């Protein structure tokens, strides 16, 4: 009994056999080789014997001057990425030498003491002052201004506004803690 033709039946095309690109060769071209150093994505297709022959004769740098070859080698040593000049290390070394010289003369101790004094002047003394500083407010301020600033910061840092970002969630927790400290101080 013959089977009825199905509407999805189709004729499968036989895969085409690629012939070797070497003139006079009737072999199957299974192996690819770039056409030139400038055309690395365009290929000749050879049989095994002729691809070996082609590879033995292949010279990537043919037609390049010595300067072009040297430039290519330099680019390859840095994975074709720009590098930073070493001048920023020289400047860093100069700063370290100056700091060592200042330490030897005693100026470093004085500079260190001045720095510690400036740091203490910048640090808030009380938790309330730290909370105000976190909200970006300076005393004297009333609770209405604190509440308005809190609402503004919540809108900016809420995780729903920032696509569920964990950093904004942590920032919001810190802002909430600052509000609790200021509530206790201003509404007590």
Image: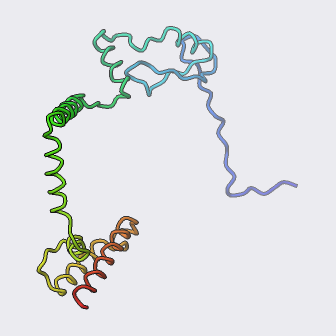
Image quadrant containing the N terminus:
bottom right
Residue 47 left/right relative to 141? right
x and y percentages locating residue 40 in the rendered image? 43, 24
Specify how the rendered protein is coloured: rainbow
Q: Viewer-proximal residue, 122 or 167?
A: 122
Residue 157 left/right relative to 49? left
x and y percentages locating residue 98 in the rendered image? 16, 33
Identified at 72% across, 57% down, the residue is: 6
Residue 182 left/right relative to 32? left
Q: Viewer-proximal residue, 81 or 41?
A: 81
The image quadrant of residue 80 is: top left
x and y percentages locating residue 176 in the rendered image? 32, 78
Q: How many marks?
A: 0
Q: Is residue 142 above or below residue 39?
A: below
Residue most extreme to the bottom: 188
x and y percentages locating residue 150 in the rendered image? 24, 79
Q: Viewer-proximal residue, 173 or 66?
A: 173
Residue most extreme to the left: 140
Q: Is residue 99 above or below residue 64?
A: below
Identified at 67% across, 45% down, the residue is: 11
Residue most extreme to the right: 1
The image quadrant of residue 77 is: top left
Image quadrant containing the C terminus:
bottom left
The image quadrant of residue 100 is: top left
Q: Is residue 150 above or below residue 5?
A: below
């Amino acid at each position: 009994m013959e089977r009825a033709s199905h509407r999805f039946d189709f004729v499968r095309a036989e895969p085409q056999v690629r012939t070797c690109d070497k003139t006079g060769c009737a072999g199957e071209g299974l192996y690819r080789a770039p056409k030139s150093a400038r055309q690395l994505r365009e290929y000749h297709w050879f049989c095994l014997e002729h691809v070996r022959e082609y590879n033995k004769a292949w010279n990537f740098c043919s037609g390049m001057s010595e300067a072009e070859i040297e430039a290519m080698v330099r680019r390859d040593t840095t994975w074709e990425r720009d590098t930073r000049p070493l001048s920023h290390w020289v400047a860093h070394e100069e700063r370290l030498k100056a700091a060592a010289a200042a330490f030897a003369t005693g100026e470093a101790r004085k500079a260190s003491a001045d720095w510690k004094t400036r740091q203490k002047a910048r640090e808030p003394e009380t938790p309330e002052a730290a909370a105000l500083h976190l909200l970006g407010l300076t005393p004297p301020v009333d609770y209405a201004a604190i509440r308005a600033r809190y609402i503004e910061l919540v809108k900016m840092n809420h995780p729903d506004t920032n696509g569920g970002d964990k950093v904004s969630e942590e920032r919001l927790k810190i802002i909430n803690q600052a509000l609790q400290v200021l509530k206790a101080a201003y509404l007590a």
